[in-house]
Amino acid sequence: MIRVAVAGAAGKMGRALIQAIDAADELTLGAAFEHAQSPALGQDAGVLAAVKGCGVAVGKDVVAAIDSFDVVIDFTVPEATLALAQACAQNNKAMVIGTTGFSEQQLQILHGYQDKMAIFTSPNMSVGVNLMLQLVARAAQALGDSADVEVIEAHHKDKVDAPSGTAVRIGEVLAGALGRDLSKDAVYGRQGITGARERSTIGFSTIRGGDIVGEHTVMFAGDGERLEITHRAQSRSNFAQGALRAVSFVHGKPPGLYNMNDLLG
């Protein structure tokens, strides 16, 4: 039985993770965490997630609960993720990280812990999205410079980073397949007299509103035809299930950095 901790337990994703863990035969909830000002502190995590009480109270002190879990799942914010990673690295606890919005410096700090613990990272835990990335790469290689490439993403009103981590990852895949430099060729939104579009551009458009779970479309716009590859998440359960697959994959692994490509083979 793998003991799992959930960071950000009171959020929508945290509750979805607790529900998924409750339904899993080989996993059990060992700990649940929230920030120091959260009204959820002290509450039973199972009750909080609308499943049966599990006797695990939501806490804020990771170190105090470090012996209660084997792997922690984190879908929070970069600052909280890094603090959690430091504690896990000091105690050889594995992490599954779905947090996005890291700066380059923050990523360097996070990746610096890979010699001390197993870290599984993915900007999107959906198996479907990661299959989409493979399709996008194949389409880009086949079409080359014959089509203009645009990435359109939509998320709920509470998402704080833009473009999404998944959209950025799509851009990286496109740039790699097309032989382009994303740092130079990406265009994030357009306004005013922008001039004609450069073929080397990889465009990004961001939509925020309502309770959209997550939608990503890659458009290859050529002369006389258009190819679109789209993934739409209808609930957070698919992200939760992907994260649980990552937990089972990374548990017991030697220290290192792992991702969805490793899981999917």
Image (tube, rainbow, N blue to C red):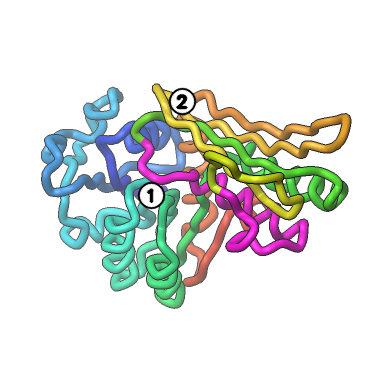
Question: Looking at the image, is 85 positioned above or below residue 153?
Answer: below
> In the structure shown, which secondary structural element does the residue marked by tag 2 occupy?
loop
Magenta span dominant secondary structure:
helix
Residue 192 is left or right of residue 41, and the answer is right
The residue shown at (43%, 72%) is: 108
Q: Quadrant of residue 102?
A: bottom left
Disc 1 packing (10 Å; few <14; some 14–19; many ≥20): many
> In the structure shown, which secondary structural element does the residue marked by tag 1 occupy?
strand
Residue 264 is left or right of residue 33, and the answer is right
Q: Which residue bears the numbered disc 1? A: 73
- The span picked out in magenta is 159-187
The residue shown at (27%, 56%) is: 80
Marks 1 and 2, how far apart at CA = 22 Å
Residue 160, percent from left and from top: 36, 42
Residue 186 is left or right of residue 146, and the answer is left
Residue 133, percent from left and from top: 68, 46
Q: Is residue 177 located in the magenta-colored stretch of the structure? A: yes
Q: In front here: 36 or 204?
A: 204
The residue shown at (38%, 71%) is: 109
Marks 1,2: beta carbons within 8 A: no
